[in-house]
Amino acid sequence: MRTVGLLGFLAMMVFVGLFTSCDNLTGKKKIQTERDSLLMVLSQRDTELDEMMSTFNQIQEGFRQINAAENRVDVQTGALSENPVTAKQQIVADMEFIRTKMSDNKTQIAKLQALLERSNTNSAQLKKTIELLQQDLAAKQEQIDLLQAELAKKNIRLEELDKAVTALQADKEALTAQNEASAQAVAEQTRALNTAWFVFGTRAELREEKILQSGDVLKSSDFNKDYFTQIDIRVTKEIKLYAKRAELLTSHPSGTYELAKDDKGELTLKITSPTEFWSVSKYLVIQVR
């Protein structure tokens, strides 16, 4: 019994030892995992901060270069009377450099703000810094606008100004061309709306030109269109027929015209309501006898 009891006790101790050993291994792995995760987070944060700082330094360097270029412009402006050609060339080059750097700084500030929004860094100070950079950019733009206005007074044409004037002139010419095209299109449309055609002749003449066929008028597509006279319905309101009898073969509302005789007894078609008269058909066919 003692032997069995001792063996059981030894077995239990071995089991406890194994369990404790496994538990220690599990704990070590957990700690190692947490440590690796923390190091990854810190490394990521360091990378984000490094990129932010690099971008911030680029912005600061951009402002420094802009200030230096402004100073050069001031110096060259003072030298205009001594060497106007060289001074103007240098001023134009520096102003173009300033314009490019201003655009770069604007892009870099936007990048810095985007980096802050994407990162896990919630720094009120960094947000304030970005706001101050944006304010500095706006203030610097006002200074450059004033400088550019002063240069314009001295008749110094800058490339960006010339480009703006050229673009404005191109826009004006394009707008003028567009207006002319629109006016022409409207005129063409108005002309088309007010264009009509008329013809008068005897029955034999109308049949010969295929205008009248088997008692039907304008039923054939191959009638002689050149036999018709084109008119503007706003202008032509009377058509002399040189005949004593006449009949309208095309459809036109009654009450919109009259056939009046002159002192020779010859008829003249008088259109009293042009818009209504031509509302049904823009072709007028009159048979005379």
Image (cartoon, rainbow, N blue to C red):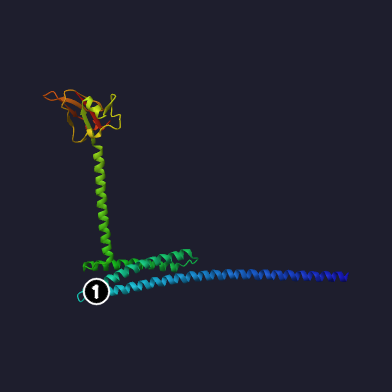
Residue 237: % across, % down: 18, 32
Q: In the displayed structure, would residue 178 be above or below residue 124? A: above
* Quadrant holding the N terminus: bottom right
Q: Residue furthest right?
A: 1
* Quadrant holding the C terminus: top left
Quadrant position of residue 64: bottom left
Is 193 on the left-hand or right-hand side of 135? left
Q: Residue furthest front?
A: 208
Q: Work out whether residue 232 can be spotted.
A: no
Residue 113: % across, % down: 43, 65
Q: In the displayed structure, would residue 268 be above or below residue 133? A: above
At horizontal 47% and vertical 72% (from top left) the residue drawn is 50
Q: In the displayed structure, would residue 136 be above or below residue 189? A: below
At horizontal 44% and vertical 72% (from top left) the residue drawn is 54
Q: Circle 1 — which element?
A: helix
Residue 205: % across, % down: 22, 27
| Residue density around tag 1, few if under 14, some if 14–19, many if 20 or more, within 10 Å | many
Q: Work out whether residue 54 can be spotted.
A: yes
The three-letter amino acid code for the residue at tag 1 is Ala
Residue 177: % across, % down: 25, 51
Is 114 on the left-hand or right-hand side of 248? right
Quadrant position of residue 242: top left
At horizontal 40% and vertical 71% (from top left) the residue drawn is 58
Residue 115 versus residue 254: which sits nearer the camera?
254
At horizontal 54% and vertical 68% (from top left) the residue drawn is 41
Quadrant position of residue 158: bottom left
Q: In the displayed structure, would residue 142 be above or below residue 274? A: below
Name the residue that disc number 1 marks. 87
